[in-house]
Image: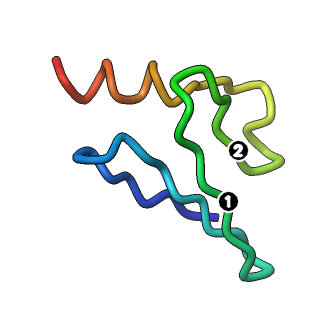
Amino acid sequence: MGWLIDPAEKLVFVYFADRTLAVFEGLGDRLAVPAFAEDFSLTVGQLFSWLEE
């Protein structure tokens, strides 16, 4: 799994191992994480607020 972060558009593209793609764009959208990190929770809005600091 990998995240590609587009700060200009405030989008996060999540690439999964099976080659599927998901796009997260709502500030309240909870980002997908790998199974080993399922207790970790991060929204698009939180991610971009950290990047803007």
Q: Nearer the viewer, residue 45 or 42?
A: 45
Quadrant of res 51: top left
Residue 32: image quadrant is top right
Residue 28: x and y, percent? Answer: 60, 20
Q: Which mark is residue 22?
A: 1
- Residue flagged by tag 2: what amino acid is it? Ala
Name which residue lies at 16% across and 17% down.
53
Query: What's the distance in space between the residues labelled 2 and 1, CA to CA?
Result: 9 Å
Amino acid found under the numbered disc labelled 1:
Ala
The quadrant in which the N terminus is found is bottom right
Q: Which mark is residue 30?
A: none
Kindly indicate the quadrant of the structure image that contains residue 47: top left
Relative depth, front residue between 25 and 31 = 25
Query: Which of pointers 2 and 1 lies earlier in the amino acid sequence?
Result: 1
Mark 2 touches mark 1? (CB < 8 Å): yes
Residue pointed to by mark 2: 32
Residue 14: % across, % down: 59, 59
Of badges 2 and 1, the one in the foreground is 1
Give whichever of 35, 23 is nearer the camera.
23
Q: Is residue 40 above or below residue 24?
A: above
